[in-house]
Image (cartoon, rainbow, N blue to C red):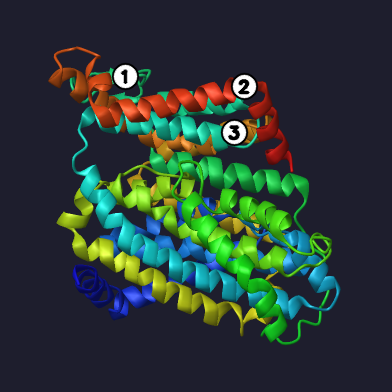
Amino acid sequence: METLSNLSLGFSVALSIANLGYCFAGVLLGTLVGVLPGLGPVASVAMLLPITFTLPPDSALIMLAGIYYGAQYGGSTTAILVNIPGESSSVVTAIDGYKMARAGRAGPALGIAAIGSFFAGCVSTVMIAYFAPPLAEVALRFGPAEYFSLMVFGLIAAVVLARGSLIKAIGMVILGLLLGLVGTDVNSGTARYSFGIPELTDGIGFIALTMAIFGIAEVICNLEGGQDRDVTAQKIGSVLPSLKDIKDSAGAILRGTGLGSLLGILPGGGALLASFASYTLEKKVARPPKNFGNGDIRGVAGPESANNAGAQTSFIPMITLGIPSNPTMALMIGAMMIQGIAPGPTVMTERPGLFWGLIASMWIGNLMLLVLNLPLVGIWIKLLKVPYRLLFPAILVFCLIGVYSGSNSVFDIYLMAALAVLGYIFIKLDCEPAPMILGFILGPMMEENLRRAMLISRGSTSTFFTQPISLAFLIASVVLLIVLISPAIRNKREEALQE
């Protein structure tokens, strides 16, 4: 009954005229971002973050959340129609989805992707509603030692699940931690690593960093690689799948929803890991499996369900523990901090309208996405014909305005330009920037909890090992590191990421 009462409060917040408008704007922008290759949910949330500064906190989070899970829907459109994933979690959808489109079955592929995503979104939102409150109750018992150990575990897990070289991923995490230390020491009040630049005493701007790394640097690389598309008119036909298609896809949708809901909670997880894991699972359990890679509708239904479920359950650790499970959730935590909200379990008790309003808006947003993606698919196809070189100036101007409006400082524009060069170098060196952002967000929080734990224990490090929860997280972190050292496990990881 308490959950129903809380959901009633949530819907009263989410169904207000203003929040309905922001939810619609978010899912519409998210779909647009997903359709246009070269931009992803991380870049779009980073670029649109300044827009939410003047909004109420609940409206800001509802809009940003809509952008995130809206991009999971939109990415399937380009993956199916032109074999170009709109964002990374739609890569595996292109394998069978594009083959279906070439065989004249683009309509059913788009339809089952939308239906699977809608079902997964609704189920994963139920999971958030029922599992987030108990987890928040547990998190309220966490002290500084437990939070520090949890963050250590989160960063190590992010390294394990990061693509590419482990050494590079560890290096990126350490760089993020170091960047997070720039600014004024909260205890002594002295400037650290500011190099005599007054503007750096407040730390490196979060918006400048994210826009530079995920916005400008990514766009430059896309321009360099050539992103113009030769979109030919395809006969889509009815987007409503047949009863046979639904019967064939039902198991894949259920498995993808369950798998994605679980993997979305993991640090470093989310939509990308969920979609790849779902496709691998479907190939193993499918009978007959021979159609996979040649236009099997199960290869569309499973990953699309999984990526949307993973996108939404990744909100659970962000809301309840204040720990981002992926770069987009790190941006959401940044948005909460900018709004003056301390992320963590106290959000549920201090701001119940914000918490439950966000959950209720996910159901509304998923229904809006179903309406947007099925009847309006023709509009999205026309957007694919816009040359990418024409979008770049608009994206660049938007980034410049966003960074300047956040601080009204020209210095942040210069900082963004310098960081964009750094981000471009990272991409060229095949260094994934996501672990760096997680380190940047968690760095100051880790330092604060480390200092608090040491003050409480009068300088004794034993506090991290005598607290059961803290010890459990540290043991789990050590186990992960030992597993990575094993050559067999490391080779399996590299093979899976390569595939």
Q: How many dots with numbers? A: 3
Q: Amino acid at mark 1?
A: Arg
Please identify the quadrant where the C terminus is shown. top right
Residue 83 in sight in this render = no
Q: Residue at coordinates 22% horizontally, 30% vertically from top-left?
A: 144
* Kind of element beneath mark 2: loop
> Would you say the residues marked 1 and 3 are in contact, meaning their CB atoms lie under 8 Å apart?
no
* Kind of element beneath mark 3: helix
Q: Mark 1 or mark 2, which is nearer to you? A: 2
Q: Residues within 10 Å of mark 3 (few under 14, many from 20)?
A: some
Residue that carries the numbered disc 2 in the rendered image: 486
Residue that carries the numbered disc 1 in the rendered image: 192
What percent of the width, then of the height, locates residue 424?
63, 35
What percent of the width, then of the height, locates residue 271?
55, 54
Q: What's the CA distance linking mark 1 and mark 3?
A: 23 Å
**Observer-nearest residue: 415 or 230?**
230
Position of 98 with respect to 7 (left or right) is: right
Q: What's the CA distance linking mark 1 and mark 2?
A: 38 Å
Q: Residue at coordinates 55% horizontally, 45% vertically from top-left?
A: 214
Residue that carries the numbered disc 3 in the rendered image: 421
Q: Is residue 367 above or below residue 52?
A: below
Residue 331 in sight in this render = yes
Residue 171, image quadrant: top right
Q: Amino acid at mark 2?
A: Ser
